[in-house]
Amino acid sequence: MDMSSAPSIEPIRKVVLAVDLSDASWRDFLMGFFDYAKRNTHWFMRVVQSNEELEKSVAESHGVVIGIQNPGRVISACARHKVPFAVVASESLPPPGTGVPSACVRNDNEGIGRFCAECFMSLGRFAAAAFVSSRAGDDWSAARERGFLGNFLDVSRHTFRTKTEPGSDDDIKALSEWLAALPKPVAVMAAWDIRGMHVLNACRVAGIDVPRQVAVIGVGDDRLFCDFSTPPLTSITPDHVLEGQLAAKTIDEMMRGKCGMKPRLVLNTAKRLVERESTRPLAPATTLVERALSFIAGNASRNIKAGDVASALGVSRSLLDLRFKELRGETLAHAIASGRLGEVKRLLAGTGLSIRAITSTCGFANPNHLKNLFRRKFGISMREWRNEQKTQSKPTTARSS
């Protein structure tokens, strides 16, 4: 038998992960991690919940995923046993010189802060912007703060840093006094959902109206906290499933020797807004949508894209898509296509331009594409529609008696 033609057998690799299973975001992370592993690898996986357990498992592992804080001893063990590792949810890259492939896989925390600011800006004008941080030393919280407050340039900006245990009676008292003293209305971003719940509790203590005086957005979309807060908490949710898939792909590549020894940064930028009552009465967002439609109408003869509209309005493409779906049941791209077809109809009815000239003027690829699109949309050809408009515009002659 020619053994050279036999299929190669994928070796079993042992991968150990340390994550906090009590946190909903980590459970979503594991769903993504396991999904990648099931489809692409032949792994034996073990999940632990402390760095101590993880450190003991390193010697028998082929790859390590570190999702718990203070990973220094685990990283040293990985270097000692020559085991590739990925640190998850840290703002800092692993130290160089470990002698093994390493990576940092995390969400784009500054981007989350910027997105939160854009969401507030789409709701209306605020007198102030405020950030409620996590515990001291949480670098991911500091990154979200930078992204959020850095986007508010024309209002006062404030940060609350607790001096006690977050959520304690002393913390809620200090937070309620701080919130009461802020200019109103104020846009408040909480570092994560539990801090958002603390903000809502502090508003109740201080008798502050949410969201008319204080509008609040958290991060994580932990439904256990968001849905049962009073009022329910609007939240930005990073795509933790995708984060898990990225982590699995990264550790897979490192174990297969496809990476060098220089620490890598793998950034997950996917996120979305889940609106609830802590912002909802402010959220018709008709002004933003009307501005977008006005821009589209004024530029329908140009080959504009969704990104052009978002840039002109100073918001993200994802936020504009969200508002269009909420208020019009369509995407921004569909609205642009409709606006361009409206310009086509105007030129057909009001000018003698040829169909080829109209195609070029309105930024379509070629006349045949436009003709097919027009017929699908309106159930009639462009030439037939133009002729109908000419017939309808002809003056009628009064019949003599």
Image (cartoon, grey):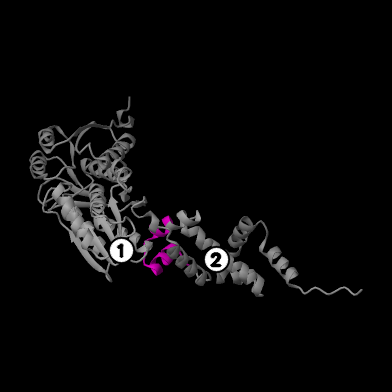
Asked where in the image residue 62 lies, by quadrant, the reply is: top left
Q: Percent from the top left, x then y, of residue 389?
A: 70, 68
Apparent side of residue 241 relative to residue 159 in the rendered image (left or right)? right
Q: Which residues are magenta?
A: 304-322
Q: In this orientation, does residue 67 appear?
A: yes
The residue that appears at 28% across and 30% down in the rendered structure is 9
Binning the other alpha carbons within 10 Å of mark 1 as few (below 14), some (14 to 19) or many (20 upward) gives some
- Point out which mark residue 381 bears: none
Q: Out of 88 and 111, give the one closest to the viewer.
A: 111
Name the residue tied to disc 2: 340
Q: Amino acid at mark 1?
A: Pro
Q: Percent from the top left, x then y, of residue 174?
A: 16, 55
User: Which residue is at the far top?
Assistant: 1
Q: SS at mark 2?
A: helix
Q: In this orientation, does residue 303 appear?
A: no
The residue that appears at 55% across and 62% down in the rendered structure is 338
- Separation of disc 1 and disc 2 at Cα? 38 Å
Q: Out of 282 and 271, give the one closest to the viewer.
A: 282
Q: Quadrant of the N terminus?
A: top left
Q: Amino acid at mark 2?
A: Arg
Q: Percent from the top left, x then y, of residue 178?
A: 19, 59
The answer to whether residue 393 is above or below residue 335 is below
Apparent side of residue 233 relative to residue 170 in the rendered image (left or right)? right
Q: Out of 297 and 35, give the one closest to the viewer.
A: 297
Main SS of residues in magenta: helix
Name the residue tied to disc 1: 185
> Are circles 1 and 2 on residues that touch, CB within 8 Å?
no
Apparent side of residue 76 relative to residue 109 in the rendered image (left or right)? left
